[in-house]
Image (spheres, coloured by chain):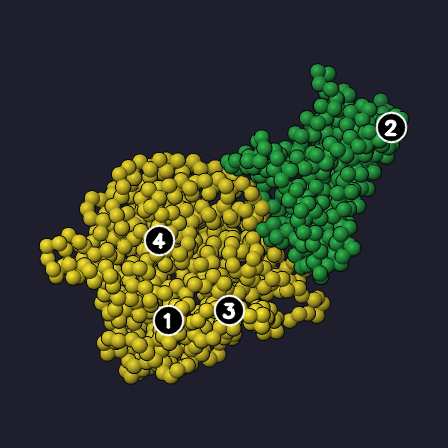
Chain colours: A yellow, B green
């Protein structure tokens, strides 16, 4: 049996003491620095134990203070691999030197490294040698500079007023023109001329500003090239400017259907860095709201999925139900889609009087609705004809492409981070992991519908067993800071003043959290160098990985099927582009 | 009938039809809203009825725009074809014993011929738009309509056999004892399904498939040219409903406490409601599934229906 210790030992013996440096991080994830020349060999070795490339990102290390004896580097490329057997992550870091360094690409080992490496190139200017198509992915092709480098300005005011001259507009338009030969696509085959169809960025079926260019033979998809980045708002860059506390509302808008669930992913990492223990009541409130948002997100998915297939009515019923959940969320948080309600150390306020009645009414009301939706949508034979046997992938392919969440469970893999690596007290709840076996569009729908039932069970358990106690931890780094003694004690007043005006200073270190978000695994990898803002905020979103897989699963199907596939993947553009 | 009477009938029918087509905007939106737990248009005028006027005015005052890359003449003609052919089809429909524009003895064939010509509007419109989405829509439309044309024609032959005439007035008269829906249930079902496909309404709106092809063959149309497609669609619904009533539900026949015309209109509106209900409830099959369903399920069904009806008709005639 291998564990992370023996794997580290093996790395050390194979690549020598000098080439391998082990870093201690606060989140207990084994972290190893290896040298750039060894990265392919290391990745190849790790793949047997860690089949999932969970995340890959760059860090600009040039301005980082308090490195606490880490190897010197101008840039690092950070790989997160996940092992289902060991149920553990491993973090591999490669230190790079120079202004615009390069590193071998690992796309030959992990196929889904493709988009991640393009993103790292786009954001840092790090070249990945041997990458099949290293171009910008999130930023426009005409962009100057690499935004996440520390010298790149973060605010619009630092960049001068924006003006779109005619010439510039022409250049921008030309950059958007799709050139098949750049992607190695032919315009003709031996017996057919292909049509290149531009789906999006403005298209009712893509649920947002996503562009997919299809190479069509008749209506059959030969190849698909997604183009993303239209929704990119520089969320990671903002993390470096906003204080630890004021960044919370930005996270709401990553997976904008997940609401406070994004707060949770971010705060778990911050709280790990700060070493804050969350009181039980706060944990349970968080779980309850997250599960309400999960139902909410799945309802939006369910309705729009049916609408993609031409069924007009379900979306109206489902949005009505969603409104009922929003009523609860509004009563508790005051906000609706982006309530910005979790705080470092807990939640913003205690639950309001009468919350239990609202939740109980919903818990009693919703199962009947789900039964009706089953009849209306899931058992509809036209719906089945459009989704069964479409967009199939196997469990191995899913892991290969970094699929998590319902997409993975639909291939018969019982994997849910809430159960396998419980956080925020999920270990105390009784619920099941719904799975299905064929991995097609229909099965993904089956899994999500059943997940709504399970979420409702969790909400009901929260309702019946809401613990008493604090809604926010009693810790100096929580936000907003504790005010109890400020009027009696000058030291406390000063601390309070600083923690409010500058925000808390989170101790230096690195931490990553991983939650089962509405669409799959969502993580924030935070690097702190002991400042009021994060040094590097990396957001790993499930939709990014899932969309990368769409061309692979979409091949050979028709345009109409592509819409079923896109609908069943359940992505949110903001979650892809961040 | 005298010439003056004729002219009045034509004007009357045209007036009523165009108003119905426009009024269906309101009917459809209100009914959909009712079924979808919404309110629907309820602001302009009593019960929101003036939305019809607002919509029509809006369409009229929109810029009459032809994309520079389109083939102009064909682009302009295409929407007129659909509205024209559907309107012309109405000439053979007996609204009441004496209200019919042209009492053709080949009425049914005339209807089939006109609906075949109607296909051209989709094909030409989609092709002339010079847009990839429109082209895909036009191709889908052509194959769908041609396939369903076949079943539509075949499904009506049972009625013709039983009544012994292509004249719609005679077909209505032949139902005095028993509606043909009782003797020809299969024919009715196939005709109605083919009718939905002919009017390319959901679930068979594959040529325009909003979530896939955006608007399909009429993606490039706006203003009153789009309005013509729109009117053509609503007239098509009315036509298919009226034909269903005439052929299978006894046309203007009904208990004498209401005049024949009222019976006809009531029955027709019932089927218009069914059309809208279908749109509210069913998802859209895939294009190849639709064609497959036509050729593999409907065609054998109508052929069997035709043979059985023929055999029974022969047997009854001999005995």
Regarding residue A49, the answer to whether it shows in the image is: no
Q: Is mark 2 on a helix, strand or loop?
A: helix
| Residue beneath disc 3 | A163
Residue A106 lies left or right of residue A488; in this view the side is right
Q: Which residue is drawn at 62% across and 53% down?
A: B213
Q: Residue B4 carries which label?
A: 2
How much space separates mark 2 and mark 1, taking CA atoms?
87 Å
Examine the image and state in which quarter residue A21 appears. Answer: bottom left
Query: Neighbour class for label 4 at 10 Å: few (<14), some, many (≥20)?
Result: many
How much space separates mark 3 and mark 1, taking CA atoms?
39 Å
The chain that hosts pointer 4 is A
Dot 3 or dot 1: first in sequence order is 1
Q: Which residue is drawn at 85% across and 25% down?
A: B317
Dot 4 or dot 1: first in sequence order is 1
Cβ–Cβ below 8 Å for labels 2 and 4?
no
Residue B284 lies left or right of residue A325; in this view the side is right
User: In this rendering, which labeled residue sits more in front, label 3 or label 4?
Assistant: 3
The chain that hosts pointer 3 is A
| Disc 3 and disc 1 on one polypeptide chain | yes
User: In this rendering, which labeled residue sits more in front, label 3 or label 1?
Assistant: 3
Examine the image and state in which quarter residue B1 appears. Answer: top right
Looking at the image, residue A311 lies above or below residue A126: above
Looking at the image, residue A529 lies above or below residue A250: below
Looking at the image, residue B23 lies above or below residue A59: above
| Disc 3 and disc 2 on one polypeptide chain | no
Dot 3 or dot 4: first in sequence order is 3
Q: Residue at x 71, y 23 (%)?
A: B263
Cβ–Cβ below 8 Å for labels 3 and 1?
no
| Residue beneath disc 1 | A79
């Amino acid at each position: 049996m291998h564990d992370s210790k023996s794997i580290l030992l093996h790395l050390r013996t194979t690549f020598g003491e000098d080439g391998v440096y082990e870093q201690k991080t606060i989140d207990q994830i084994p972290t190893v620095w290896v040298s750039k020349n060894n990265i392919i060999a290391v990745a190849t070795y790790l793949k047997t134990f860690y089949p999932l490339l969970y995340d890959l990102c760059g860090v600009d290390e040039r301005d980082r203070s308090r490195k606490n004896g880490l190897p010197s580097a101008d840039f690092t490329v950070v790989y997160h691999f996940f092992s289902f057997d060991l149920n553990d992550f491993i973090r591999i870091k490669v230190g790079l030197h120079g202004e615009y360094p390069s590193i071998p690409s690992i796309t030959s080992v992990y196929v889904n490294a493709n988009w991640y490496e393009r993103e790292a190139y786009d954001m840092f200017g790090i070249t990945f040698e041997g990458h099949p198509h290293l171009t910008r992915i999130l930023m426009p092709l005409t962009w100057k500079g690499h935004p996440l480098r520390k010298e790149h300005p973060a605010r619009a005011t630092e960049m001068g007023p924006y003006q779109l001259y005619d010439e510039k507009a022409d250049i921008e338009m030309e950059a958007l023109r799709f050139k098949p030969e750049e992607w190695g696509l032919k315009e003709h085959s031996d017996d057919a001329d292909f049509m290149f169809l531009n789906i999006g960025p403005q298209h009712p079926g893509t649920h947002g500003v996503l562009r997919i260019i299809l190479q069509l033979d008749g209506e059959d998809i030969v190849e698909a090239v997604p183009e993303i980045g239209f929704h990119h708002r520089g969320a990671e860059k903002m993390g470096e400017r906003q204080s630890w506390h004021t960044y919370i509302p930005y996270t709401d808008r990553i997976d904008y259907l997940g609401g406070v669930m994004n707060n949770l992913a971010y705060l778990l990492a911050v709280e790990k860095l700060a070493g804050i223990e969350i009181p039980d009541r706060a944990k349970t409130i968080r779980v309850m709201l997250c599960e309400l948002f999960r139902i909410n997100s799945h309802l939006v998915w369910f309705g729009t999925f049916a609408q993609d297939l031409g069924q007009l009515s379900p979306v109206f019923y489902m949005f009505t139900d969603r409104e009922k959940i929003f009523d609860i969320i509004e009563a508790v948080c005051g906000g609706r889609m982006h309530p910005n309600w979790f705080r470092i150390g807990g939640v913003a306020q205690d639950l309001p009087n009468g919350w239990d009645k609202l939740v109980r009414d919903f818990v009693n009301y919703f199962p009947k609705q789900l039964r009706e939706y089953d009849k209306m949508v899931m058992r509809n034979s036209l719906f089945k004809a459009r989704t069964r046997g479409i967009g199939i992938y196997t469990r191995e392919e899913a892991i290969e492409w970094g699929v998590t969440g319902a997409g993975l469970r639909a291939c018969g893999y019982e994997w849910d981070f809430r159960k396998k690596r419980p956080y925020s007290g999920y270990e105390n709840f009784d619920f099941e992991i719904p799975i299905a076996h064929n991995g097609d569009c229909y099965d993904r729908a089956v899994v999500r519908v059943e997940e709504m039932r399970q979420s409702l069970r969790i909400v009901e358990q929260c309702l019946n067993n809401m613990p008493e106690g604090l809604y926010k931890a009693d810790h100096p780094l929580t936000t907003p800071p504790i005010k109890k003694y400020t009027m009696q004690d000058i030291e406390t007043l000063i601390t309070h003043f600083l923690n409010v005006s500058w925000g808390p200073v989170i101790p230096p270190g690195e931490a990553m959290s991983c939650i089962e978000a509405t669409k799959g695994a969502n993580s924030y990898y935070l690097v702190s160098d002991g400042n009021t803002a994060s040094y590097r905020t990396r957001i790993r979103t499930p939709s990014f990985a899932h969309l990368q897989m769409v061309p692979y699963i979409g091949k050979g199907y028709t345009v109409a099927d592509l819409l079923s596939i896109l609908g069943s993947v359940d992505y949110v553009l903001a979650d892809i582009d961040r | 009938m005298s010439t003056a009477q004729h002219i009045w009938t034509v004007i009357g029918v045209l007036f009523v039809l165009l108003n119905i087509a426009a009024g269906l905007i309101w009917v459809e939106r209100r009914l959909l809203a009712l079924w979808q737990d919404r309110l629907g248009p309820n602001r302009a005028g009593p019960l929101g009825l003036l939305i019809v006027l607002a919509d029509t005015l809006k369409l009229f005052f929109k810029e009459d725009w032809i994309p520079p890359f389109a083939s102009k003449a064909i682009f302009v003609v295409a929407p007129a074809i659909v509205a024209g052919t559907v309107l012309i089809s109405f000439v053979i429909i007996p609204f009441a014993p004496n209200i019919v524009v042209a009492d053709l003895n080949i009425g049914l064939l005339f209807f089939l011929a006109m609906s075949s010509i109607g296909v051209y509007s989709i094909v030409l419109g989609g092709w002339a738009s010079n847009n990839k989405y429109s082209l895909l829509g036009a191709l889908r439309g052509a194959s769908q309509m041609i396939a369903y044309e076949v079943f539509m024609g075949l499904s009506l032959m049972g009625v013709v056999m039983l009544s012994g005439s292509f004249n719609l007035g005679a077909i209505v008269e032949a139902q005095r004892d028993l509606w043909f829906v009782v003797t020809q249930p299969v024919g009715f079902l196939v005709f109605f399904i083919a009718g939905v496909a002919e009017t390319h309404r959901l679930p068979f709106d594959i040529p325009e498939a909003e979530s896939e092809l955006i608007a399909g063959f009429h993606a490039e149309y706006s203003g009153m040219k789009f309005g013509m497609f729109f009117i053509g669609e609503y007239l098509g619904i009315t036509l298919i409903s009226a034909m269903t009533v005439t052929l299978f539900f006894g046309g203007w026949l009904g208990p004498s406490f209401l005049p024949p015309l009222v019976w006809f209109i009531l029955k027709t509106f019932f089927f218009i409601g069914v059309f809208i209900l279908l749109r509210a409830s069913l998802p859209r099959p895939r294009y190849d599934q639709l064609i497959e369903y036509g050729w593999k399920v409907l065609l054998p069904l109508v052929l069997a229906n035709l043979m059985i009806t023929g055999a029974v008709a022969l047997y009854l005639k001999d005995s």
